[in-house]
Image (cartoon, rainbow, N blue to C red):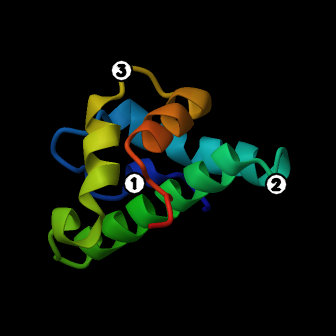
Amino acid sequence: MGGGLGELPVVEGVDSRLIDSLSAMYEDRSTSRVADVSSVVVRDCVIWFSYGLFRASRGDDPRKETPSTILNVLSSLKEADGDGLARALIEADWGRLS
């Protein structure tokens, strides 16, 4: 993920400190607990959000490119913590197969 996500456009409602921590969360979750469901959910969230930020850097609306569940969870988080993010995503049914 390179130099961090903070270099890309900020999404309204999402704390910039959280955006800066997402790449660290991704790195942490990709090197340990790889088979853990919460790690997969966090990595998926970070990838989707990164894609939305990438599209925003090209002039697109990141809210159209990022699933609303992810934006809602990221907007509601008070601290940049991988376990808290995983818990909030799972409680919001992110990654649930229907």
Report the front residue among 82 and 57.
82
Q: Earlier in the sequence, mark 3 or mark 1?
A: 1
Residue at (39%, 54%) from the top-left corner? 7
Residue 36 image offset from top left, x and y in percent: 77, 47
Residue 10 image offset from top left, x and y in percent: 25, 50
Residue carrying label 2: 35
In the image, residue 51 sits, relative to residue 10, either above or below, namely below
The circle on residue 98 is: none
Residue carrying label 3: 78
Residue at (50%, 35%) from the top-left corner? 85
Residue sticking out furthest to the front: 98
In front: label 2 or label 3? 2
Report the front residue among 27 and 41.
41
**SS label for mark 1:** helix
**Quarter occupied by residue 58:** bottom left
**SS label for mark 2:** loop
Residue at (42%, 49%) from the top-left corner? 93
Q: Quadrant of the C terminus?
A: bottom left
In the image, residue 87 sits, relative to residue 47, either above or below, namely above
Residue at (57%, 49%) from the top-left corner? 42
Q: Give, as a three-letter code, the residue at label 3.
A: Lys
Q: Give, as a three-letter code, the residue at label 2.
A: Ala
For label 3, the crowd category at 10 Å Cα-Cα, with few meaning under 14, some 14 to 19 and many 20 or more, is few
Residue carrying label 1: 7
Q: CA distance from mark 3 to mark 1?
A: 21 Å
